[in-house]
Image (cartoon, helix red, strand yellow):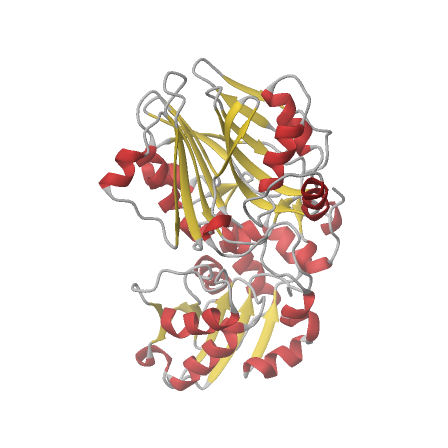
Amino acid sequence: MCGIIGAFGKNEVASLAIQSLVALQHRGQESWGVLTYEGKDSQRFHSHRMRGFVEADIETIARLKGSVAIGHVRYGTSGGSNLRNAQPFFGETRFGGVGIAHNGNLLNTEEIRTFHLESGSIYQSTSDTEAILHLLSRSRKKTFEECLVDALNQVKGAYSLVILSEEGLLIGLRDPRGFRPLSLGKKDGCYLLASETCVWNEIGAEFIRELQHGEMVVVSHDTIESSFPFASKKCKHCVFEQIYFSRPDSMVDDLLVSSSRYRIGKVLAAEAPADADFVSPVPESGVASAEGYAKVSGLRLKRGLIRKRSYNARTFIQPTEDLRQEGVRRKYCPDPAILFGKKVVLVDDSVVRGTTFRLLVEMVREAGAIEVHLRIASPPFKHHCIYGIDTPSDGELLASTMSIEEMRKYFNADSLAFISLKGLHHALGEDICPSKSRFCNACFTGNYPVL
């Protein structure tokens, strides 16, 4: 999971691009970058890539000259965390300079990379994204757009892309399944692309629409052109965008995320009630589901866990287990005034590795809670994701190695319950067999969509 943005305007867009990346910081915290293009007169590209959180001073913004830009915040799923894997990537082709930023994960790039290296190509990173640049450069199709489509027809996996070319084009793409989101907006005559619509809320832009699965939009000085250059496939949007990844104020695949989570909490309460004094969310992704749970259960909603303002990182997307464990205590502070002598229902979005909950239950008990009941707003996460979540093997996933009762004992909780798969899809507005859903639920079922 990463965040991508694009901007095409008549004036300088670096500041707008960086503001947009700040709004997507929750999607990636390992590195960030911006690539700008000044235009055909100067034919100059400017790049800035850094480790850590998005930040930029006046000098950086002034150096990133240009009326077209793409940007990226990285949460690595392929390649290491070093700076050479920071995006956007840039390369020279027969069409001139090309920049690319990618959200998703490609599955067949090792064989593509091996073939290229054995035939004399030079790779500058270990990221799967760089393979797209090589395939584009090698394509013998006539136009830049045709070469791009030819390149993408050779890769398998999940991708939403923003691409900047020396022809003065800004291109946005969603793969034929539409695993990862991408939307189109506008501000003061500047057309914008972003992974989530929360960007438009934050920078004061107009939301135009979301890109459809398999759609390519090409923004130039005169027009925005839309096409569907790939073979048609049934959409399979990532259900985890609704559960955890996306910001609550984003509209993703025609659903307002906060409303989705609220409805999930209501279904969860109906399926798994608890004898407790109150409901407490695990902030922040568990808040809306806890509100829904409280509504149906009739229990009061209280903030027994406080998220420290001084800690901004998302625990799940920390690159190592040690950092994830350290992050839990640095991130949360239980409130003894609320928890002491009480029976509490803790509601959170998911259990993946189990890092958060084992420590949270310990901390809540240390604050005086006499019973801790865990309610999870997703089914058990049993299967590794191959489409952009950093879960390389099933062995890292607690639900793949333990039963629910074993997990309850591992967490030292008084009870543990997950929403059912059918209940999840019902909360997302689907009363159909989950296998026929428009959402990818492979992390729960092991049924991976055919690419």
Q: Is residue 307 above or below residue 33?
A: below
Q: Is residue 441 above or below residue 138?
A: below
Residue farthest toward the front in the current orientation of the protein: 120
Work out whether residue 356 or residue 409 is closer to the camera in this orientation and state it: 356
Work out whether residue 276 can be spotted. no
The mark tally for this picture is: 0
Q: Residue at x 76, y 44 (%)?
A: 450
Residue farthest toward the left in the current orientation of the protein: 58
Q: Is residue 48 above or below residue 218?
A: below
Work out whether residue 38 or residue 434 is closer to the camera in this orientation and state it: 38
Give x and y (percent) for residue 232. 72, 30
Work out whether residue 117 or residue 58 is closer to the camera in this orientation and state it: 117
Horizontal relation, residue 123 to residue 120: left or right? left
Work out whether residue 220 or residue 205 is closer to the camera in this orientation and state it: 220
Horizontal relation, residue 317 to residue 203: left or right? right
Horizontal relation, residue 163 to residue 19: left or right? right
Q: The C terminus lies in which quarter of the figure?
A: top right
Work out whether residue 132 can be spotted. yes
Q: Residue at x 33, y 30 (%)?
A: 13
Give x and y (percent) for residue 279. 44, 70
Give x and y (percent) for residue 263. 53, 54
Give x and y (percent) for residue 366. 40, 86
Q: Residue at x 58, y 41 (%)?
A: 130
